[in-house]
Image (spheres, helix red, strand yellow):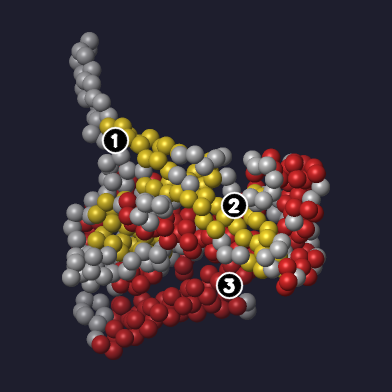
Amino acid sequence: MSKLKQLKEKRASIYSQIDQLRTAADGREMTAEEQQRWDTLLADYNKVDKEVEAEERFEQIRRHQLEQAENTPAHTPEDRSAADRQYEEAFRAYLLSGSQGVTPEQRTLLQERAGLQGLTAGVLIPSTLAGSIEKALKSFGGMFEAGSIITTGNGGDLILPTINDTAAKATIVAEYAQSTKRTPSFSSVTLKAFTYRTPIIPVSQELLQDSAFNLDTILSDLLVESFGRGANEHLTTGTGTGQPKGLVTAATAAAQEAAATAITLDNILDLIAGVDSAYAKNGKFMFNRNTLFALAKIKDNDGRFIWQDGSRVGLPSTLFGKSYVINDDMAGIGAGNASVLFGDLSKYKIRMVKSFRIIRLNELLAEYLSVGLFGFARLDGTLLDAGTHPVLKLVHAKA
């Protein structure tokens, strides 16, 4: 039996114990002993769930390595243009040997794609690798999964128009009668381009010269983990001053506050009800893992738990029938915190300039026979809200 299958079976077993415990306590408060066991089981579930995610990621990398070894990449040469293949060769030559190791033709390709003269400002990664990195980012942190990504060719201000015409309704008009006039409310938001850099990663010359060196894997790790952590934090709680305006910051507070240290069924119902139906039909929740554990204890008026585990049947787990996104950069339950979001999260727009760029540093680590690699990208984010409040946040009362 594979390790992944064992972990999934272990997770299912823990969930079965959770389900049995909450069924046994149906209609009454848990005893202190039951509450302690409940907390332990939820912590165990969270731990195993993370192990499943890690093992699934390892399996993806392992399959990719096998494809590389068998020379059967996901995109066959026939699927890619000759220009793409030439650019990938130039990109690899730059990483392996630096700017001095590329041919004049390769230098021209790298400069044209980056839109710059010279290679000191780095080179853009190939589109095939960019696609895989952006896909991986969606499983990291939460915001790249929830938001909509807009890619632009330059870093100039990007103005997105918004319109509020929700009050307009069609009416019955008699024949030859004049139609009513209404002016919708127009506005706009501006997205800038903030530069995010990863830490410098030392790579030995021996590793670069090793034919088994998997460039795609190390670049994915470099860009996804480092870049994802920093960007996700700002896309979640950024102030909007010198950094993106995070989704939590931009969301509108629900009409009713939650208690300082707890969430009730009514809080969740009011949160859902407060979002316009046009947004609620595609609505998702967002919260951190600890908040999920608290929500998993809440029952509806018929005594059913509002959290349902879908992993046993191969479906996403839900809260009140709605899917959710885990984002550990959100605050947990606590006085003054915004612990839960609900609404059409895709209305949060993430603007990225071109793609990720890689810079090779030759001299910094030369005495260690190593080079330094770091990546950077430019982005911004904001919520498109024309006054219709597509996303609401549940805020806790201050102590």
Count of marks overlaid on the render: 3
Coordinates of residue 359 in the picture (x, y in percent) = 65, 56
| 299 left or right of 128 in image | left
- Circle 3 sits on which residue? 55
- Circle 1 sits on which residue? 164
Q: Amino acid at mark 2?
A: Phe
| 237 left or right of 99 in image | left
Placement of 130 over or under 174, stated as above or below: below
Which quarter shows the N terminus? bottom right
Residue at (48, 55) in percent of width and height: 144
Residue at (35, 55) in percent of width and height: 239
In the picture as drawn, the residue positioned furthest to the top comes out as: 176
SS for callout 1: strand
Residue nearer the viewer, 332 or 307: 332
- Circle 2 sits on which residue? 356
Distance in Å between CA atoms under marks 2 and 1: 35 Å
Which mark lies nearer to you, 2 or 1? 2
Residue at (23, 25) in percent of width and height: 182
| 86 left or right of 296 in image | right
